[in-house]
């Protein structure tokens, strides 16, 4: 819907569905894949009776017919406590028997609740009432000639609260509406991305404790860590999120939130920004969640560029409720996005397992869920390999300590070995992006990983004027867990940014990324070495026997802020008694 005056629906094709199955729900920008948007809009228009006949493919027509035979559809507005009207959609089963409801807060996209209409119909088909809604402020908003704005039908009023107290209150208001209109036997929340964070927060904050289960897909655990991890602003992620609300920033956010965003971008008043983000973090309310015992299902990706996996692991590990964690190859929503949007001819495990969790905990189905391992990890880049473990702690069963060494004569790489090697220094110039980079594009590089096409790096193009590298001997390794880097850095000013990348280096000099993470030193002594230690993001990766590890460190990545003065010199070193090392988790 690019024109508010044009509500015509173009018939869907099987080619469009195939394109979504192949490419997922994201397009470059990032933005929503137009084909995925078209499917949601066509389904909703059909349910409303505003579409021409035969706009759906045969399989979607059959799904609509099956659900229409057992349920009624409505498109209400739910009024929040402060008078804000939330766009919503209900599928009410035609039965006098109490049935559970799945409440689905929409993700952070211009399509609001419309994008995953296919999933709503599938949930109804499984025996749930469904109540989907768009969180306040989210959804397409159009400027109109002569001034002013007009909203799409699925766009909720108000301004975006980014998972704040208004969103908690709204979730409780939606629960009350569901109780009044649907009379559910139990209440679950299922959310993807933004909706998943709201789902966790609703479970923690609903005054009456009415949430019986949660499914959180591509979720966050600590928003402050996601935005400001290791004192480094995740600028690209925030820019992408602001651009995907569906309208101009000055309309989508109130003055206080715009000030937070401005401070974040400028790198000022960051303690205030951090406090604002922590208020919106499920990790801040673990006591409440644990006391309520809400069964919670998590699904995330290794190379997540919006909500990095470690902060989700922190929450998962601290929960004492019934819980499960799936970790997949790829980036934000790549595993589950298509399965929430279109039919698949075979299993779609990221969505199938989420629905199975609800079936067990909400429908009381006797299924495979009680026998699941608590953690199930897909191994990069072998999608057929999934490893179940009894807990996250069981993913790692040992550590290989590799010390960073100097650069042997006639080479350009330092060494990674079991031998302590103090006394070396390597220098490079700041201010330039390098071929060592986390991703080419937010979300879409990871979507290619999910499809089986991980980015191939040519390490011969790594310009050592702007980065440093260390390489191990060849050998098979099963990387499982959170790698850690320790070294000393000398900058010319008090604040210094480093970005570390861990690669799988093939014999031909090409590489694939295993993991990465930035780190910013604050208030260091200019011209003096500062010892720093930081964790990279968790990974599950099998390195072949004839491949080597490469660790690269530079000063700048397109995803993050950069505290370094441009074109200054950074020195990395290894001190006697405090040698530089890489701790490699093995499993």
Image (cartoon, rainbow, N blue to C red):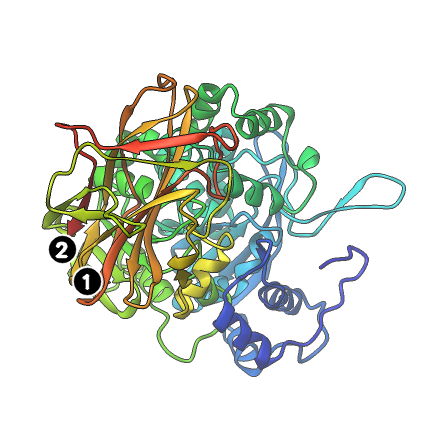
Q: Residue at x 49, y 34 (%)?
A: 561
Q: Residue at x 64, y 25 (%)?
A: 255
Residue 3 rendering spot, x and y as whole percentages: 78, 57
Q: Could you tell me which secondary element the residue under label 1 belongs to?
A: strand
Q: Is residue 73 left or right of residue 222?
A: right
Q: In this rendering, is residue 320 above or below 60?
A: above
Asked if the residue at tag 2 contacts the one at tag 1, i.e. Cβ–Cβ closer than 8 Å, the answer is yes
Q: Is residue 120 left or right of residue 297?
A: right
Residue marked by disc 2: 587
Q: Nearer the viewer, mark 1 or mark 2?
A: 2
Can see residue 512? Answer: yes
Cα separation between marks 1 and 2? 10 Å
Residue marked by disc 1: 387
Q: Could you tell me which secondary element the residue under label 2 belongs to?
A: loop
Q: Residue at x 43, y 25 (%)?
A: 274
Crowding near the residue tagged with mark 2, few <14, some 14–19, many ≥20 C-alpha atoms within 10 Å? some
Q: In this rendering, is residue 339 above or below 249?
A: below
Q: Residue furthest right?
A: 146
Q: In this rendering, is residue 560 above or below 366?
A: above
Q: Quadrant of residue 220?
A: top left
Can see residue 212? Answer: no
């Amino acid at each position: 819907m690019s024109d508010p005056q044009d509500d015509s629906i173009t018939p869907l094709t099987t080619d469009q569905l195939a394109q979504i199955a192949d490419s997922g729900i994201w397009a470059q920008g990032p933005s929503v894949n137009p084909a995925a948007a078209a499917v949601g809009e066509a389904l909703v228009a059909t349910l409303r009776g505003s579409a021409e006949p035969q706009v759906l493919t045969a399989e979607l027509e059959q799904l609509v017919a099956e659900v229409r035979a057992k349920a009624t559809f409505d498109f209400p507005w739910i009024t929040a406590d402060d008078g804000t009207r939330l766009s919503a959609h209900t599928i009410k089963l035609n039965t006098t028997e109490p049935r559970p409801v799945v409440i689905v807060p929409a993700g952070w996209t211009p399509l609001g609740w419309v994008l995953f209409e296919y999933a709503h119909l599938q949930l109804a088909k499984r025996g749930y009432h469904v109540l989907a809604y768009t969180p306040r402020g989210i959804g397409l908003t159009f400027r109109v000639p002569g001034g002013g704005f007009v909203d799409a039908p699925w766009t909720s009023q108000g301004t975006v609260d980014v998972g704040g107290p208004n969103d908690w209150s709204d979730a409780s208001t939606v629960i009350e509406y569901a109780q009044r209109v649907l009379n559910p036997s139990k209440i679950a929340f299922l959310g993807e991305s933004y909706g998943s964070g709201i789902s966790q927060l609703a479970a923690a904050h609903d005054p009456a404790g009415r949430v019986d289960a949660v499914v959180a897909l591509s979720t966050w655990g600590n928003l402050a860590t996601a935005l400001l991890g290791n004192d480094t602003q995740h600028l690209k992620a925030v820019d992408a999120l602001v651009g995907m609300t569906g309208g101009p920033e000055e309309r989508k956010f109130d003055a206080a939130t715009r000030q937070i965003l401005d401070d974040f971008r400028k790198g000022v008043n960051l303690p205030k920004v951090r406090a604002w983000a922590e208020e919106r973090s499920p990790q801040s309310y673990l006591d409440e969640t644990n006391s309520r015992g809400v069964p919670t299902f998590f699904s995330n990706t290794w190379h997540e560029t919006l909500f990095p996996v470690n902060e989700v692991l922190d929450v998962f590990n601290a929960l004492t409720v019934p819980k499960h964690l799936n970790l997949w190859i790829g980036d934000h929503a790549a595993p589950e996005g298509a399965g929430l949007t279109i039919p698949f001819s075979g299993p779609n495990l990221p969505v199938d397992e989420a629905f199975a969790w609800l079936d067990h905990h909400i429908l009381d189905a006797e299924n495979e869920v009680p026998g699941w391992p608590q953690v199930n990890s897909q191994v990069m880049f072998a999608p057929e390999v999934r490893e179940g473990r009894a807990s996250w702690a069981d993913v790692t069963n040992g550590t290989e300590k590799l010390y960073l060494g100097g650069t042997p004569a006639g080479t350009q790489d330092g060494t990674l070995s079991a031998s302590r090697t103090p006394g070396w220094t390597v220098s490079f110039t700041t201010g330039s992006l390098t071929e060592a980079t986390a991703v080419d594009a937010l979300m879409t590089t990871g979507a290619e990983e999910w499809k089986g096409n991980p980015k191939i790096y040519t390490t011969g193009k790594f310009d050592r004027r702007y980065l440093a590298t260390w390489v191990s001997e060849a050998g098979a390794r099963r990387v499982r867990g959170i790698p850690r880097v320790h070294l000393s850095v000398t900058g010319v000013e008090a604040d210094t940014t480093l970005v570390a990348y861990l690669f799988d280096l093939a014999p031909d000099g090409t590489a694939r990324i295993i993991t990465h993470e930035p780190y910013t030193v604050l208030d260091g002594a200019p011209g003096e070495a500062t010892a720093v230690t930081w964790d990279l993001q968790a990974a599950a990766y099998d390195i072949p026997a004839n491949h080597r590890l490469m660790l690269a460190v530079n000063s700048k990545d397109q995803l993050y802020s950069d505290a370094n003065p441009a074109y200054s010199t950074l020195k990395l070193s290894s001190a006697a008694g405090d040698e530089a090392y890489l701790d490699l988790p093995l499993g």
